[in-house]
Image (cartoon, rainbow, N blue to C red):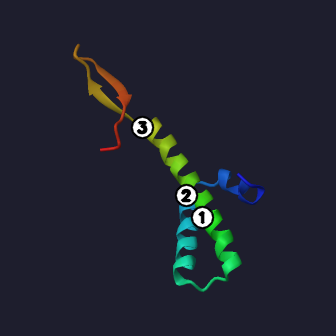
């Protein structure tokens, strides 16, 4: 992560997602100069990676409760991929 993106690591998922949405809107409008477009695209890529990592962390923390063969409840990782 570059120094210009160091603040991203401290962002909450929601804050990073909001900024990423703002960047997408700016790029879609096409009213940003080329150099700034490149810079905000790079920041957007860093934000996307951060959001993906935060989601993966959350997924690993989520567990589901299942009834084991012995009739006792136990926790196991949730399969959130479908």
Q: CA distance from mark 2 to mark 1?
A: 6 Å
- Residue shown at the point (31%, 30%) measured from the top left: 65
Asked if the residue at tag 2 contacts the one at tag 3, i.e. Cβ–Cβ closer than 8 Å, the answer is no
- What residue is disc 1 on? 44
- Residue 9, image x and y in percent? 66, 51
Point out the tag, 3 or 2, that comes first from the N-terminus.
Answer: 2
Q: Secondary structure at mark 1?
A: helix
- Residue shown at the point (66%, 71%) measured from the top left: 38
Q: Secondary structure at mark 2?
A: helix
- What residue is disc 3 on? 62
- Residue 62, image x and y in percent? 42, 37
Which of the image's four quarters has the C terminus? Answer: top left
- What residue is disc 2 on? 48
The residue closer to the viewer here, 17 or 4, is 4
Numbered circles on residues, count: 3
- Residue 16, image x and y in percent? 58, 60
For residue 4, what is the image quadrant?
bottom right
Q: Is residue 43 above or below residue 12?
A: below
């Amino acid at each position: 992560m570059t120094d210009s993106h160091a603040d991203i690591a401290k962002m909450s998922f929601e804050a990073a997602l909001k900024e990423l949405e703002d960047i997408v809107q700016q790029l879609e409008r096409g009213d940003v100069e080329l150099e700034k477009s490149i810079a905000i695209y790079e920041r957007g890529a860093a934000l996307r990676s951060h959001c993906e990592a935060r989601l993966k962390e959350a997924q690993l923390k989520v567990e589901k409760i299942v009834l084991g063969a012995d009739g006792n409840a136990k926790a196991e990782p949730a399969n959130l991929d479908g």
